[in-house]
Image (cartoon, coloured by chain):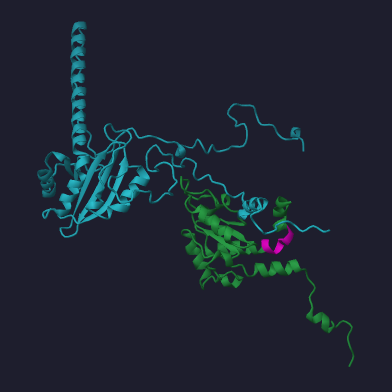
């Protein structure tokens, strides 16, 4: 079958050259998109944002007033009718009931007790949606955990969860390590948080809460934070020879090619056995018997 | 008492002429013993296929062996991760010839929804696969249909074909 008999595709530039092939490597799911913001909940950041928004609104209003004054003076000079005075726009009412609860002032006694006992080592305390958060300095985390566990007024017996997040856009720190404590006797929960820069080893919580052992190993496996004084700081989910830490934001979803393995070709270990046989180490004769 | 010429003789009544290869294939196809080996949710469907409602034993494949050295079939039922791949390869190597592999479900055939760093995109990158069964997870009927396809493949296979490429490699 010759090519002349086939209908030739039109030469318009819109027409694709051949059959449509999805560019698998260029698909948007496979691109590493680094976040530009630091979505870390913090009362200080929230107050600064609110203040900046109010200041921007005020600046906009002042600019409108100034524009009105210049337009008015110009109209008077030209003998025209004066323009209308501006009306300050009322902020639009947001009826969205799915809004994120914003951080609020700490009212709980536990947070104030932590601040009182730890002093300057507490960087920030706030509440958000009824959850207590206390951010301590990264060197004082073991002290804070000991206090939470042993202080009779706090009495947080259980480390329910320990996890970390990567914030590549942040300045001054790269990760936040979060400790979720639960007090079974007092039916309360508390969140401790430290901000850790790259290559910093925070103190391991295993001395206070033994359940931190595997969670810290998981954090090391997924994000690469090495905890100091940990009994066994090795990978827990990935194999021992794994390269990279998959939950970092700069890690591609498809990995660094570890999954593209192919030991299909060595069919049932046959090539290896043949190699062994050629080396004279295997007594099995795989050769086809030939007729004399 | 007259003897009809159309009546077969006694010898013809008790003898069937066939090929050795056909008998071998028939015996192999009707007693395929799988390995007890499941990786993810497809293994639940595999267990359901083996249980009384679907009764995999009707096809001679209900005896799930606890060791690969007594098994003929490996049903890859579930997601194949990078960490599990050498284990699967070792189990496959431990199975005696002739051996067959069924890739069950979309994860084992092509990675499924897990287009991620840790999932092998199809078990055929590791071991040769005879039958692919689509589905997420496939119902026991699908597994049984795929197994019947494998039986057809075994019935049409030749003893010489199976080892031809190996003999060619050895020379």
Quarter of the image that includes the N terminus of chain A: top right
Chain A: colour as depicted: cyan
Most foreground residue, B112 or A283: A283
- In the image, residue A288 sits, relative to residue B53, either above or below, namely above
- In the image, residue A19 sits, relative to residue B103, either above or below, namely above
Quarter of the image that includes the C terminus of chain A: bottom right
Horizontal and vertical percent position of residue B77: 51, 59
Horizontal and vertical percent position of residue A71: 21, 13
Which SS type dominates the magenta stretch?
helix
Furthest toward the front, the residue is A280
Most foreground residue, B146 or A273: A273
Side (left or right) of A20 relative to A165: right
Side (left or right) of A230 relative to B34: left
Name the quadrant containing residue B33. bottom right
Q: Can residue B86 be spotted in the picture?
A: yes
Horizontal and vertical percent position of residue A142: 20, 47
Side (left or right) of A15 relative to A201: right
- Picture mark count: 0
Q: Can residue B128 be spotted in the picture?
A: no
Furthest toward the bottom, the residue is B1
Name the residue at 58% across, 58% down: B93
Horizontal and vertical percent position of residue A185: 16, 60
Side (left or right) of A68 relative to B92: left
Most foreground residue, A251 or A30: A251
Chain B: colour as depicted: green
- Region of the chain picked out in magenta, as a range: B153-160
Is residue A19 a member of the stretch shown in magenta? no
Name the residue at 10% across, 45% down: A117
Name the residue at 23% across, 44% down: A193
């Amino acid at each position: 079958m010759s090519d002349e008999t086939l209908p030739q595709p039109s030469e318009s530039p819109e027409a694709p050259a051949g059959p449509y092939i999805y560019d698998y490597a260029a698909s948007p799911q496979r691109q590493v998109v680094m976040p530009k913001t630091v979505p870390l909940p913090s009362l200080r950041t929230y107050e600064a944002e609110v203040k900046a928004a109010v200041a921007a609104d005020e600046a906009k209003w002042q600019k409108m007033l100034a524009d009105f004054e210049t337009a008015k003076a110009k109209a008077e000079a030209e003998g025209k009718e004066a323009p209308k005075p501006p009306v300050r726009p009322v902020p639009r009412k947001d009826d969205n009931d799915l809004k994120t609860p914003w951080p609020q002032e700490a009212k709980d006694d536990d947070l104030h007790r932590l601040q009182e006992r730890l002093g300057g080592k507490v960087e920030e305390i706030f509440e958000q949606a009824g959850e207590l958060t206390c951010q301590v300095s990264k060197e004082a985390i073991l002290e804070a955990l000991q206090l939470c566990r042993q202080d009779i007024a706090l009495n947080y017996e259980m480390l329910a969860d320990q996890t970390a997040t990567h914030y590549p856009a942040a300045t001054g720190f790269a990760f936040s390590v979060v400790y979720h404590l639960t007090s079974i006797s007092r039916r309360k929960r508390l969140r401790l948080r430290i901000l850790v820069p790259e290559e910093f080893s925070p103190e391991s919580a295993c001395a206070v809460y033994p359940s931190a052992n595997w969670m810290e190993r998981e954090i090391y496996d997924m994000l690469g934070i090495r905890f100091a004084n940990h009994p066994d700081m090795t990978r827990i989910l990935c194999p021992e020879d794994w390269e990279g830490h998959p939950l970092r934001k700069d890690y591609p979803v498809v990995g660094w090619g570890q999954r593209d393995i192919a030991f299909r070709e060595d069919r049932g270990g046959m090539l290896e056995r043949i190699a062994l046989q050629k080396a004279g180490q295997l007594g099995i004769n795989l050769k086809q018997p030939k007729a004399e | 008492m007259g003897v009809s010429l159309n009546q077969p003789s006694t010898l013809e009544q008790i003898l069937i002429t066939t090929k050795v290869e056909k008998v071998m294939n028939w015996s192999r196809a009707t007693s395929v013993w799988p390995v007890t080996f499941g990786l993810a949710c497809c293994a639940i469907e595999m267990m359901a296929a083996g249980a009384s409602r679907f009764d995999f034993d009707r096809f001679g494949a209900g005896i799930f062996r606890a060791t690969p050295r007594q098994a003929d079939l490996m049903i890859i039922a579930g997601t194949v991760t990078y960490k599990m791949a050498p284990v699967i390869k070792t189990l496959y190597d431990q199975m005696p010839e002739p051996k067959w592999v069924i890739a069950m479900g979309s994860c084992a055939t092509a990675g499924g929804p897990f287009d991620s760093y840790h999932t092998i995109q199809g078990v055929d990158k590791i071991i040769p696969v005879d039958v692919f069964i689509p589905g997420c997870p496939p119902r026991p009927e699908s597994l049984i249909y795929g197994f019947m396809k494998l039986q057809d493949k075994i019935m049409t296979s030749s003893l010489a074909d199976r080892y031809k490429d190996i003999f060619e490699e050895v020379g």
